[in-house]
């Protein structure tokens, strides 16, 4: 027997034709059944003057608090996904940094089991695992915080074997064009439906364009882990800003890149995607890398940036604070990452979309409540 629908009323900001200064959303089972303007016929859940937006989708999150996805067991994964849900992230790609090749099977087995648990628990909904983002180990001349001994050129045989066993859980791979000069890995991954991102690279602009022609579709955390933009050598940054087949992601903690540069990316690429690149500073590591908290970021002992400590909700607030319209910021955290993944069910407040909704306070854009698959997430 179906449960009665939940009706939410507030200001609708979904980055779609259904944006309304005053409107309502009907959630029925795990879908949005209807969206309308004005006052709904049914009594809505009283959320005051809340702003209702699509659930946030994080394409790059390494861990939360003291739960590092690379080293945690299934129970700790689910705990981390619960924390993310309370912070407005309704779906994500848990991210694994460069590691020894022999370590990936075990990490991906844990990921698969955690994804199944996250999808099956209707009573206590958590952020859904849309797959895993492998950031490395096939990186190039700008490894950043990645352990250099684990960074290597493409091993196509190993990659084919990995995909044969784990192709159902790997959703995105960040690699460097110089680690895959023949684009064999890009073509292989693309043929398997896996999103290829370019990052941690000193590739030239022409290299990046060629990689995009081979099937690459994303630039991982633009400006970070790549050569700086130069007016005669635009490099990977220049490609991120100008090549329409490449969508840039941005770490908007306002430390990884200056607020003016965040604004530049948004102006140049209205389709840019916000990522948290959050790491489990409470665990003291991200995969094999030792990190420490330093404000909104994590750093290595030598001061190298090693990720952030923000959520996507924090990133949305940050870009709004520098002058970005709320609808644009919300789209960068929901609609745009869904487009990158080819996921038409998420990132929209529209009939038929998944009932993943976040209520934000009107004044500060703080997360008031989250619904995942039509189920309200337990408050923190």
Image: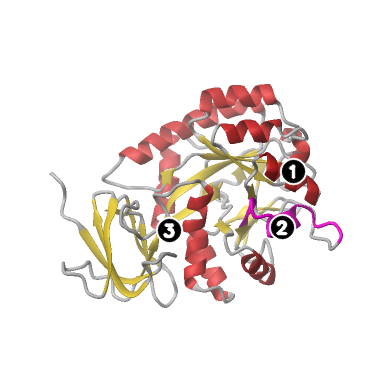
Q: CA distance from mark 2 to mark 3?
A: 26 Å
Most extreme residue toward the right is 232
Q: Residue 133, image x and y in percent?
A: 56, 41
Residue linked to disc 1: 210
Q: Residue at x 23, y 70 (%)?
A: 46
Most extreme residue toward the left is 1
Q: Secondary structure at mark 2?
A: loop
Residue linked to disc 2: 223
Taking depth in this image into account, of 104 and 18 the one nearest to the observer is 18
Label 1, residues with CA under 10 Å away: few <14, some 14-19, many ≥20? some
Q: Nearer the viewer, mark 2 or mark 3?
A: 2
Q: Nearer the viewer, mark 2 or mark 1?
A: 1
Label 2, residues with CA under 10 Å away: few <14, some 14-19, many ≥20? many
Q: Secondary structure at mark 1?
A: helix
Q: Quadrant of the C terminus?
A: bottom left
| Residue 202 can be seen, yes or no | no
Q: Which residues are magenta?
A: 232-249
Write down the quadrant of residue 254 in the picture: bottom right
| Residue 196 can be seen, yes or no | yes
């Amino acid at each position: 027997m179906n449960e009665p629908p939940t009706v939410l009323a507030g200001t609708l900001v979904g980055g779609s034709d259904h944006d309304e200064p005053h409107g309502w959303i009907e959630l029925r089972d795990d879908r949005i059944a209807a969206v309308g303007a004005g006052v709904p016929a049914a009594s809505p859940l009283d959320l005051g003057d809340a702003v209702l937006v699509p659930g946030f989708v994080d394409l790059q999150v390494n861990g939360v608090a003291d739960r590092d996805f690379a080293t945690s067991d299934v129970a700790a994964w689910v705990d981390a996904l619960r924390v993310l849900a309370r912070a407005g992230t309704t779906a994500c790609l848990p991210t694994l940094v460069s590691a020894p090749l022999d370590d990936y099977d075990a990490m991906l087995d844990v990921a698969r089991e955690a994804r199944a648990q996250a999808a099956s628990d209707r009573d206590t909904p958590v952020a859904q695992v849309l797959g895993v983002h492998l950031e490395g180990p096939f990186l190039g001349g700008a490894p950043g915080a990645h352990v250099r001994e684990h960074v290597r050129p493409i091993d196509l045989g190993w990659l084919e074997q990995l995909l044969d066993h784990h192709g159902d859980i790997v959703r995105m791979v960040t690699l460097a064009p110089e680690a895959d000069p023949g684009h064999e890995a890009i073509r292989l991954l693309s043929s398997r439906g896996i999103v290829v991102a370019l990052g941690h690279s000193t590739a030239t602009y022409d290299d990046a364009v060629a990689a995009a022609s081979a099937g690459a579709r994303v630039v991982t955390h633009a400006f970070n882990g790549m050569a700086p933009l130069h007016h005669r050598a635009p490099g990977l940054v220049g490609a991120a800003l100008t090549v329409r087949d490449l969508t840039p992601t941005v770490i908007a903690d306002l430390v990884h890149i200056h607020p003016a540069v965040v604004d530049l990316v948004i102006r140049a690429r209205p389709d840019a995607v916000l990522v948290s690149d959050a790491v489990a500073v409470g665990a003291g590591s991200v995969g094999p890398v030792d990190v420490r908290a330093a404000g909104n970021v994590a750093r290595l002992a030598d001061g190298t940036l090693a990720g952030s400590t923000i959520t996507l909700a924090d990133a949305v607030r940050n870009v709004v604070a520098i002058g970005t319209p709320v609808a644009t910021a919300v789209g960068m955290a929901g609609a745009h990452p869904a487009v990158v993944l080819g996921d038409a069910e998420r990132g929209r407040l529209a009939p038929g979309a998944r009932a993943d909704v976040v209520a934000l306070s009107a004044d500060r854009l703080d997360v008031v409540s989250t619904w995942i698959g039509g189920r309200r997430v337990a408050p923190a």
